Image (spheres, rainbow, N blue to C red):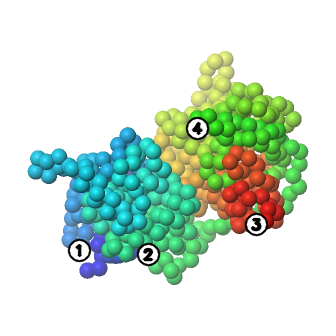
Amino acid sequence: MDYVVEMLNIRKEFPGIVANDDITLKLKKGEIHALLGENGAGKSTLMSILFGLYQADRGQIRVNGKDVNISNPNVANELGIGMVHQHFKLVHNFTVTENIILGLEPKRGLSVDVKSAAKRVKELSEQYGLNVDPNAKIEDVSVGMQQRVEILKMLYRNADILIFDEPTAVLTPQEIEDLMKIMRNLIKEGKSIILITHKLKEIKAVADRCTVIRRGKFIGTVDVDSTTKAQMAEMMVGREVLFSVEKPDKEAGEVILKLDKVSVKSNREGVVAVKDFSLEVKEGEILGLAGVEGNGQSELVEAITGLKDIVSGKIFINGKDISNFSIRERINSGIAHIPEDRQKRGLVLDYTIGQNMVLEIYDRKPFSERGLLNHNAITEYAQQIVEDFDVRAGQGVESVARSLSGGNQQKAIVGREIELNPDLLIAVQPTRGLDVGSIEYIHSRLIEQRNRGKAILLVSLELDEVLNLSDRIAIINSGELVGIVDAKDTNENEIGLMMAGIKRGDTD
Ligand SMILES: Nc1ncnc2c1ncn2[C@@H]1O[C@H](COP(=O)(O)OP(=O)(O)O)[C@@H](O)[C@H]1O
Ligand SMILES: [Mg+2]
């Protein structure tokens, strides 16, 4: 028997939705098996069943050929199944080792010996190339490192069936490369891996086989080498996917946003994050701001949207100095903002989608009149956005924002901001963590705005995205403008060098 896990005809229903409808997934020993599907397809649900967090309504699970009943995560652990969740479950003021041994039963009345545990953690870290310091505090280490602690946690418990739930969503490109290496090491040491993702590039890079599910249904299992990205994308989305969006040539018009020598303090103590930054974004253009994470992009956007004061310089919209305007006044001046963190800044998660669609404008007519909210007008307005932007939610505008998948939350935010009909749309990481179908959709809506003569400032860590969408690209490094290039007249290499602070024409 060469399957370590067989999940057969699994069904799981939540109130109002069949999250898994007759899904079968078989994991071979020593393979990396990708589980591919759009946001909300049912991937996490299926894996939560394998990890004992949920019980299937129907279907069967076999581990190493034996029927099993995984009634809780302890049973999963005993069967050698480990899982790294989308959101890590680490205690921030504990050390790496303390986190790893947390929850383990001390043997025979002895308390767990932290010293020998730390030694074991170190050995495992070295064996698998994880590069983790057993004594570091979680709050002091990077997100990538925290993820490796989660991996160690599985290894420490002797798991040999490892589930990764969208592990790369939170990582930088370099950390992603490192993780791919680690996965290959794990396979070499005899582990088997299920990798949940919606990134085809990653599947191509590491996976052997791939199971695709769509809206809770099993679509197929394919061999990765002999299947193209386009074929997998089509299985996932259910239609052909265009990987690049058509963008007609267009002359840029008047200057909409003008930054004149803007400096902004860092979100970290003391330092200046943005220094003397000057930039113009014009009507009918997408200006992409490229940079490595943490080079001042966030602070710059916060300064433009009014979340943060500037230290010096001036910000103009349509020629008007808005440097001292409140957030509300800036929105009224024509700025819309798709924020970096859709859950913290984009939506009020406990509000309905309807309420979320009028967050910035509920006090305007017709949504409020003489101090009273007009619920019908709000519902009608929200309904239109939900339809126009393909926001899929169980109970439509009445759905609580929290219950939507990430992709649908993001489509709702994009719809809301575009519906404001702004002169300037600031889109920060608009497709972070989304599947190709949603990415394609959001890209086409951004280009549509540009074609309609809007100015768009696109801030993204995805170089592909910046290159595909932008008309001009500004590169930021350590808070300073390195240069501005024409998107047609540059490439990934040049931008990459500029992101590292090397100006065009610099030789040596
Ligand atoms: N605990 C839950 N209660 C109700 N609905 C849920 C629950 N967990 C997931 N769902 C719903 O089930 C569907 C599949 O979700 P999920 O498995 O998280 O998808 P994926 O991981 O592929 O993005 C979604 O529509 C989601 O809203
Ligand atoms: Mg998920």
CA distance separating discs 2 and 3: 44 Å
Quarter of the image that includes the N terminus: bottom left
Disc 2 marks which amino acid?
Arg
**Mark seen at residue 209:** 2
The image quadrant of residue 418 is top right
Could you tell which of marks 1 and 3 lies nearer the N-terminus? Answer: 1
Question: Is 149 left, or right, of 81 in this rendering?
Answer: right
In the picture, the disc for residue 508 is 3
Quarter of the picture holding the C terminus:
bottom right
* Kind of residue indicated by mark 1: Gly
The reply to whether callout 1 and callout 3 are in contact (CB within 8 Å) is: no
Q: Which residue is mark 1?
A: 65
- Assess whether mark 2 and mark 4 are in contact (beta carbons under 8 angstroms): no
**Mark 4 vs mark 2: in front:** 4
Q: Please give left or right for residue 204 compared with residue 503 in the image.
A: left
Mark pair 1, 3: CA separation: 61 Å
Q: In the rendering, which numbered label is found on residue 268?
A: 4
Q: Are marks 2 and 3 in contact (CB under 8 Å)?
A: no
